[in-house]
Amino acid sequence: MNNGYLDMQLLRFTTAGSVDDGKSTLIGRLLYDSKSIFEDQLEAVETASKSRGNEEVNLALLTDGLRAEREQGITIDVAYRYFATPKRKFIIADTPGHIEYTRNMVTGASTADLAVILIDARHGVMEQTIRHSYVAALLAIKQIVVCVNKMDLVDFSQEVFDKIVADYKAMSANLPIGKVDFIPISAKNGDNVVNASTQTPWYTGKPLLEFLETVNINVDSTDPFRMAVQYVIRPISDKFADFRGYAGRIASGVVKVGDKVKVLPSGQTSEVASIWLSDKELQEASQGDSVNICLKDDIDISRGDVLVAGDTAEPEVGQTIAMNICWFRETPLQLGKRYIIRHATQEVQGMFKSIDYKIDINSQEKQTGISQLTMNDIAFVQLKTASPLVFENYHTNKVLGSIIVVDPDTNDTLGAGMIE
């Protein structure tokens, strides 16, 4: 039972849509109809709408503050919007949809539980729809909601909606995407956004907000326990003279006092003696908890080591890693060049041995014979690290499956990798 705002479950979702699909209007409608905007914000939007000659409030103006900057060529990574209802808290990652902003969508979608993809009812599934769906699949987003917008411009036709649903299912059949739901909406008029519409009696599903409030995002308790060690805690005090704890954020699964665990890459084993959350002792902890774990045995463990369940299949340990990568910078990825590789809580040196192929994310064709990558490119590459990493497939574990590539001279983030 929720005890207040701080106890409510948080849903992170990303939005994607082509130019003029109505993404800004949809986000504005969600904020407006859920009463998640301040009066001065609404007054400012009403004034701006009148100055532009709009007869009604232009809800897109609630979220379009960054559009002018984008048009001027200023780099905007991701605009985050925050709102809450009595049932759930939300963070929206609002990313631009143009192909030149692929890296921005990758950034915004990387932490999302769900993706909302807009399709204009008049135009149906387009090249941009394929691109956005591919990126969502690449980033292992397990829940997609396809909002068929501007249904008011096609007379709320069930036939039009059903054809788009069929076309999308055919298009996405070869993509490794999870569950997909479809909602017919009119963001401008509010149909099926926050409130159910009388214009679509043939649609029996939930309006978008109710869907977002109730969609299941609970952690799978059957996932094996994984935690990368961030700090070794050794308090200097008489009270905790022999205390040695390993602090980190649990990447997956559940750990309990008495569980057998293995330390990787060393392979040493032990048993959980106690679990601490600040000064509170726990009997168990689960994914997302930042805890301090004490073991029964005195083992040499340091930052970057990974604690895993001792009775399950282990992650891989190695120095050669195959992965998909999205390159973020104009400075190209170069084979044989040394980079800083950040993985979980570890930082090592590494270099790229080969680019197996680059992916055309509009057609998903694989282009071979590539010697370097430039900004927004997505490719399948082979990475060699100076010391072993403990890793898993990104679709299995996003924490142990993620790689960040950093410039050793400037410390700029150059790219993000998803381990296969």
Image: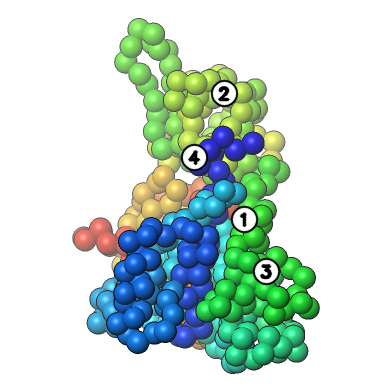
Dot 3: few (<14), some (14–19), or many (≥20) neighbours within 10 Å? many
Secondary structure under the numbered disc 2 in the rendered image: strand
- Tag of residue 340: none
* Residue beneath the point at 69% across and 36% down: 311
Q: Is residue 181 above or below residue 386?
A: below
Secondary structure under the numbered disc 1 in the rendered image: helix
Q: Which of marks 2 and 3 is in front?
A: 3
Label 2 with label 1: CB-CB less than 8 Å: no
Marks 1 and 4, the one that precedes in the sequence: 4
On-image quarter of the C terminus: bottom right
Secondary structure under the numbered disc 4 in the rendered image: helix
* Residue beneath the point at 49% across and 27% down: 277
Give, as a three-letter code, the residue at label 3. Ala
Give the farthest residue toward the left: 409
User: Which is nearer the eye, 220 or 371?
Assistant: 220
Which residue is denoted by mark 2 in the rendering? Answer: 282
The x, y position of residue 302, in whole percent, is 41, 34
Dot 2: few (<14), some (14–19), or many (≥20) neighbours within 10 Å? some
Which residue is denoted by mark 1 in the rendering? Answer: 213
Q: Is residue 390 above or below residue 282?
A: below
Give, as a three-letter code, the residue at label 1. Glu
* Residue beneath the point at 35% across and 18% down: 235
C-alpha span from label 3 to label 1: 14 Å
Marks 2 and 3, the one that precedes in the sequence: 3
C-alpha span from label 2 to label 1: 30 Å
Q: Nearer the viewer, mark 3 or mark 1?
A: 3
Give, as a three-letter code, the residue at label 4. Leu
Give, as a three-letter code, the residue at label 2. Leu
Which residue is denoted by mark 4 in the rendering? Answer: 6
Which residue is denoted by mark 3 in the rendering? Answer: 196
User: Which is nearer the eye, 175 or 148?
Assistant: 148
